[in-house]
């Protein structure tokens, strides 16, 4: 898929005020610093579409972008921010819960994980929750250019082994790098395929 148009639509803390669910929607989520904003910018070839962690005043909002006037890309606030107070975390949970429960046009959520670290409980728990709700998701391994091929393969294998313990079927998995552009065609191709189903 070619990204011809990518525009910011709105930011929200209230999921009920998101744009009308009149187009297929794909959400991106992961732990803070996993590389979510960089990946979104890489996918859309817009350097500043999603605000990266370094951006001052980055807040916990649901950000909608319209791609090719055809589908929504959603940048969800990251989780697992070590310094976040309990109150903030609860607020995040309520917001995300409500978003996932009510967004009727949500086709797939991409859960981003860092390819250099072992499966983390917080990520696995989030995926479990998605499973319990019957919501489809896929995993994107980020920052793969930082390790050699073998280490990246091992990272994927560790996820597969861990997930096989509880899942009958494994989700689609993608390898990505915002630096090299790796994974762009595969992820956009997957969205294209789902859009056509
Ligand atoms: P977010 O908090 O998940 O949105 O993460 P950001 O996109 O802001 O990235 C967090 C940090 O990781 C920044 O310093 C990025 O430059 C860096 N980063 C993101 N993606 C990559 C990548 O593919 N490769 C490398 N080497 N660094 C990355």
Image: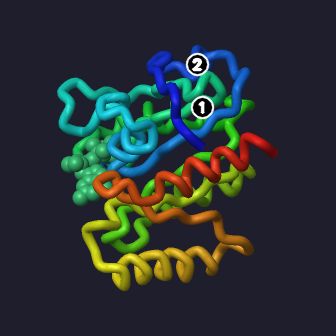
User: Are circles 2 and 1 on residues that touch, CB within 8 Å?
Assistant: yes
Residue 186 location (% of width, % of height): 55, 57
Q: Residue at x 68, y 30 (%)?
A: 103
The quadrant the N terminus occupies is top right
Residue found at the very far right of the displayed protein: 197
171 or 100: which is nearer to us?
A: 171
Q: Residues within 10 Å of mark 2 (few under 14, many from 20)?
A: some
**x%, y% of residue 7?**
47, 21
Query: How many other residues sit within 10 Å of disc 1, few (<14), some (14-19) or many (≥20)?
Result: some
**Residue at 72% over, 32% down:** 105
> Is the residue at mark 2 in contact range of ligand 1, meaning its CB lies under 8 Å from it?
no
- Residue at figure coordinates x 36%, y 58% from the top left: 177
Residue 160 pos. (x, y %): 56, 78
Quarter occupied by the C terminus: top right
Which quadrant would residue 73 be assigned to in this image? top right
Report the side of 116 relative to 182 (left or right): left
Name the quadrant containing residue 55.
top left
Q: Is residue 67 above or below residue 179?
A: above
Measured in 3D between alpha carbons, the distance from the residue under mark 2 to the one under mark 1, in whole angstroms, is 9 Å
Tell me the number on the disc at residue 99.
Answer: 1
Mark 2 = which residue? 18
Front one among 39 and 31: 39
Q: Nearer the viewer, mark 2 or mark 1?
A: 2
Please identify the quarter of the rendering in which residue 142 is found.
bottom left
């Amino acid at each position: 898929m070619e990204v011809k148009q990518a525009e910011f639509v709105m930011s929200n803390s209230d999921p009920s005020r998101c744009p009308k669910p009149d187009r297929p929607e794909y959400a991106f989520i992961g732990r803070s610093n996993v590389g979510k904003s960089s990946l979104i910018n890489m996918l859309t070839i817009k350097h500043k579409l999603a605000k990266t962690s370094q951006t001052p005043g980055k807040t916990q909002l649901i950000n909608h972008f319209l791609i090719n006037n055809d589908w929504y890309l959603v940048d969800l606030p990251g989780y697992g921010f070590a310094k976040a107070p309990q109150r903030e975390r609860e607020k995040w949970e309520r917001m995300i819960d409500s978003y996932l429960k009510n967004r009727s046009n949500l086709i797939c959520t991409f859960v981003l994980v860092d390819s250099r670290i072992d499966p983390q409980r917080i990520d696995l728990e989030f995926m479990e929750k998605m499973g319990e709700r019957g919501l489809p998701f896929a995993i994107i391994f980020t920052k793969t250019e930082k390790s050699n091929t073998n280490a990246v393969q091992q990272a994927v294998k560790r996820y597969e082994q861990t997930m096989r313990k509880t899942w009958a079927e494994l989700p689609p998995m993608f390898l990505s790098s915002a630096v090299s552009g790796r994974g762009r065609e595969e992820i956009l191709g997957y969205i294209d395929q789902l859009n056509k189903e």
